[in-house]
Amino acid sequence: MQSSTPSALPAACDFTVFGGTGDLALRKLLPALYLRDRDGHLPDDTRIIGVSRSELDDAEYRDDVRAALAEHVDADRLDPDVLDRLLRRVHHVRLDATAPEDWHRLHGLLKDRDAYDDAVRVFYLAVGPSLFDPICRRLEEIGVTDAGSRVVMEKPVGHDLASARSINDAVGRVFEESQIFRIDHYLGKESVQNLLVTRFANTFLEPLWNSRWVDHVQITVAESLGVGDRGGYYDQSGALRDMVQNHLLQLLCLVAMEPPTYVGRETVRDEKLKVLQALRPLTPADVERDTVRGRYGAGLVDGVPAASYADDLGHADGRAETFVALRAEVQNWRWAGVPFYLRTGKRMDRRTSEIVVVFKEPPHAMFPHSEGGTTANRLHIQVQPDEGMRLHLTAKEPGPGGIRLRPVSLDLSYATAFDQASPDAYERLLMDVIRGNPTLFMRRDEVEAAWSWVEPILTAWAASPARPKSYPAGTSGPIAAAMLLERDGRTWQEPDQ
Ligand SMILES: NC(=O)C1=CN([C@@H]2O[C@H](COP(=O)(O)OP(=O)(O)OC[C@H]3O[C@@H](n4cnc5c(N)ncnc54)[C@H](OP(=O)(O)O)[C@@H]3O)[C@@H](O)[C@H]2O)C=CC1
Ligand SMILES: O=C1O[C@H](COP(=O)(O)O)[C@@H](O)[C@H](O)[C@H]1O
């Protein structure tokens, strides 16, 4: 998905990562920057400045980055010359973001760039949100927040609407909205971008993409991993905040949005916002009926024993749900009456992110005496792994006798069609930040509209004496999630269907 006016690559870039020694920086950001450097995409004069309180000089930090790249980049993509070039770009600044006296160190390094007219400064906030406000204020004080500067925020932005507004206000006091890049890494996935291309660069789907022909939509983001060592964060968050408020609602928006007049910086975001604003607000009774929350117990994942959430957390007082399923509706002309079923969970039976658009049954049974039956057509968009698309149809089985109906599918595998691996989402998104293209980032109004819709669910759950329903690790979630669809005469699409 390109903006209508692709932005130029600047001659110089200072890419500052607050939290440069953290998990996100070392596991995702540095590998993505390395891979873009490998393909010659970084500005020639790029510096990558890791900021943290750790007592590291440049050489020690470079050692840490080298080790992280060895761990997180495939060995066959690690080129020693590129690695050395990248490491020469890397610096570390020891700075406690809350200590005013430390900031001269970063200022000293950044002001070297004053000679460049078009140097871009990126400030990536890979730290807890409580540091966003102090960091932005200090950046303003040291005079590095002009139009050439960009700030990147990770999701989740806040833990409810009020805290999201407060974070947005704090960052917005220093940076213009056009300088603020709120990452939802799902928007950087190739298959997610391709969803818009499939819908809007082809004609065959559009006449069918509405309540007349679509029965319902299913969006599943299932993970086989548990919370790992992120339990501290996760238990404050839970699957609704961690996944639904951002990734799943963004996927829903891309399925449901109207075609923009062109794919531009604001047009896609304008259309996504309209979808979020059209989501039917849930009353407490709707939450009771249309949402399911679960939490994994011990079980087997791929035949291997897997711990319970309490074991992963290290105590039994966990509060968070690790699974959510819910029924949403988009109240507009196109989608009135079409349910959107969303589910996401950890420690499930498989890792998959997929969107299934289930079309209506044929209006008239023309082959009543044939063997086999018709099944509803389905478009299955496989976001990950094994990106691709499958269109499920009914066909006649070849043979000289009578008509025998059989389900078949038209399969598109990206790996086969394009013979190349998809880049990691961060590779695309970090380059968009450097180029200043915000199309694939969430605008303030989108984030807040998503929180507005999610908040009644959080409130109703907090008020309810019920606990999340238990499901064994390695399954497709609590039985109640299946019942959510059965009640409507439908079932979740599982892989063997
Ligand atoms: N990890 C992930 O996959 C994802 C993370 N996020 C979000 O990104 C943020 C960072 O996550 P993650 O990397 O996992 O966290 P980590 O705890 O691994 O890293 C935190 C980083 O912040 C630094 N830091 C903490 N306090 C200060 C301070 N006062 N001044 C300067 N630096 C400080 C730490 O270094 P030091 O202690 O040396 O100062 C460290 O480099 C969080 O908000 C998280 O929710 C979002 C999506 C995914
Ligand atoms: O943002 C998050 O996403 C990951 C899942 O991302 P994926 O690209 O591996 O599908 C999730 O594990 C994590 O809890 C959440 O914070």
Image (tube, helix red, strand yellow):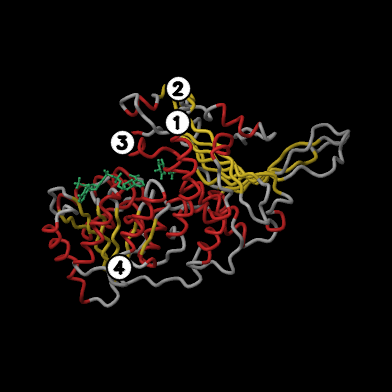
The image shows residue 186, relative to residue 149, as above or below, that is above
Q: Nearer the viewer, mark 4 or mark 2?
A: 4
Q: CA distance from mark 4 to mark 1?
A: 40 Å
Residue underneath mark 3: 232
The reply to whether the C-beta atoms of the residues labelled 2 and 1 are less than 8 Å apart is yes
Identified by mark 3, the residue type is Gly
Pointer 3 or 4: first along the chain: 4
Q: Position of residue 271 (x, y in %)?
A: 55, 61
In the figure, is residue 330 to the left or right of 445? right
Give the crowd class for mark 4: few <14, some 14-19, many >=20 residues within 10 Å.
many
Identify the secondary structure beneath mark 4: strand
Q: Is the residue at mark 1 in contact range of ligand 2, meaning its CB lies under 8 Å from it?
A: no
Residue underneath mark 1: 347
Identified by mark 1, the residue type is Arg
Q: Nearer the viewer, mark 1 or mark 3?
A: 3
Q: Quadrant of the C terminus?
A: top right
Identify the secondary structure beneath mark 1: loop
Residue underneath mark 2: 299
Q: CA distance from mark 3 to mark 2?
A: 22 Å
Residue underneath mark 4: 149
Identify the secondary structure beneath mark 3: helix
